[in-house]
Amino acid sequence: MISDEPLRQPRWTTAIFDLDGTLVNTVELIVESFRHAEREVRAGDVDPDIARSWMGRSLVDIYGDAPDAGTMIEAYLRFNHANLEVLQTSYEGVVDLLQDLSRAGVKVGVATSKGRESARRSVASAGLDDLVELTTTADETVLHKPHPDPILHAQRMLDAGDEQCVYIGDAIWDIRAGRAAGIDQIGVTWGAGDTADLEAETPSAGVAHSVDELRDLLLA
């Protein structure tokens, strides 16, 4: 439901969000997808903390030029797609926040390192279809976060100038991508990223430890 508080004025006219660990809770899903691929292909395992540190980057960048990179990505995606709606959960207050941003006239986009089909399913499963525009996925750009291309593509899609735009994410890759794109950044600490590492990146517009704090940063 839409907040009953008086209409606030937005600090930016466009807000671009990371998806995983920021708008939707896919931390367990992604960690278990990495572990499944490691077990199936390499007969090993990966520490969950290490898997969480990979979140925010594309699978192509994570697996790089390893000889079994393609097989690892296929195993990851099979598990991820089969379990997305089962393991993904919602963050309390996100829907209300997005409704408040819409009410304040803020354009809301998503720039994620997920593939488009996975991202579309995540957005739909969380009930965010009518609240965000899925502007950039791993399928739209050759280079991925922390490179600025995903953010720049989202800006073009939303017709947003640098001074009007902020990028919000839970990982250091998000902050670095926003900074490289020349726009403001906000870090959020409820996702997969390490809070100390995130704060050490000194996002230009601050760090939010709750959805209410994020609302206060976005809406004056």
Image: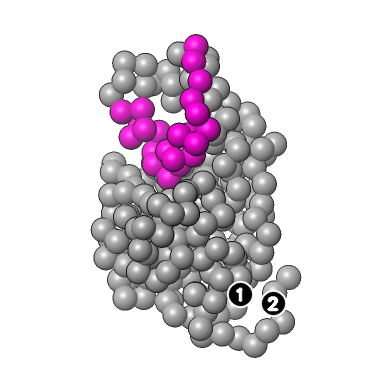
- Compared with 60, 104 (above or below) is below
Which residue is located at x 59 percent, y 64 percent? 210
Which residue is located at x 36 percent, y 27 percent? 63
Q: Which x, y percent locates residue 75?
A: 50, 21
Which residue is located at x 30 percent, y 71 percent? 162
Circle 2 Cα neighbour tier, 10 Å, few/some/many (<14 / 14–19 / ≥20): few
Q: Is residue 163 magenta?
A: no
Q: Amino acid at mark 1?
A: Asp
Name the foreground residue: 158 vs 81.
81
Q: Amino acid at mark 2?
A: Ser
- Disc assigned to residue 181: none
Residue stretch rendered in magenta on the structure: 43-64
- Disc assigned to residue 3: 2
- Compared with 142, 217 (above or below) is below
Q: Which x, y percent locates residue 95?
A: 65, 63
Which residue is located at x 40 percent, y 33 percent? 59
**Local SS, label 2:** loop
**Local SS, label 1:** helix
Q: Is residue 48 magenta?
A: yes
Q: Which residue is label 1 attached to?
A: 100
